[in-house]
């Protein structure tokens, strides 16, 4: 899966996801850290990358309707400490068919994964 990690995620997560076979880049690597969300979003879309973020500015499913973009994974952990976040994401990417989440709106919590797929 092609992913873009927002600046609010640990850089080490990119290395872990790449080791699992995913094509990962980060907002920091592209010089997008600190820039407006619209710029990060445009970069994700232009490169056909699913955006992984903790930023609630990407939480409006009406604004980011499934099927209108390459995908969004919104992380909403109860205690989003660096290690717990990395462990949760790594576990998901090891056990779930995340490739099937292309163009979806996905919310990942401590206990659940909610996937909104494009309507047919």
Image (tube, rainbow, N blue to C red):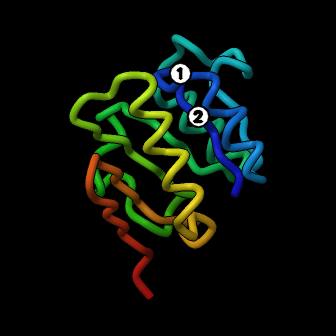
Which of the image's four quarters has the C terminus? bottom left
What is the quadrant of the N terminus in the image? Answer: bottom right
Residue 2 horizontal side relative to residue 108, left or right: right
Furthest residue to the top?
A: 34
- Return the x and y of residue 3 as percentages of the image width and height: 65, 46
Q: Which residue is mark 1?
A: 7
Q: Which residue is mark 2?
A: 5
Percent x, y of residue 96 = 52, 66
Outermost residue, bottom side: 120
- Tell me the distance, in whole angstroms, between the alpha carbons under discs 1 and 2: 6 Å
Q: Is residue 92 above or below residue 84?
A: below
Numbered disc 1: secondary structure: loop
Q: Residue at 54% of width from left, 37% of height from top?
A: 41
Task: Classify residue 31 by image quadrant.
Answer: top right
Q: Depth check: 96 or 117 in front?
A: 96
Q: Residue at x 67, y 43 (%)?
A: 17
Where residue 32 sits: x, y (%)? 63, 19
The answer to whether marks 1 and 2 mark residues whose Cβ atoms lie closer than 8 Å is yes
- Circle 1 packing at 10 Å, graded few (<14), some (14-19), many (20+), is many
Q: Is residue 117 above or below residue 106?
A: below
Image point (59%, 50%), residue name: 50
């Amino acid at each position: 899966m092609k992913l873009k990690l927002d600046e609010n995620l640990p850089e080490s997560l990119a290395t872990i996801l790449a080791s699992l076979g995913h094509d990962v880049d980060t907002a920091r690597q592209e010089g997008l850290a600190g820039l407006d969300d619209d710029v990060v979003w445009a970069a994700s879309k232009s490169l056909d990358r699913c955006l992984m973020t903790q930023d609630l500015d990407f939480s409006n499913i009406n604004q980011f309707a499934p099927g209108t973009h390459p995908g969004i994974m919104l992380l909403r952990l109860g205690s989003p400490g660096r290690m717990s976040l990395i462990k949760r994401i790594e576990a998901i990417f090891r056990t779930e068919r995340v490739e099937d989440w292309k163009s979806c709106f996905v919310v990942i919590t401590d206990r659940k994964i909610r996937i909104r797929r494009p309507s047919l």
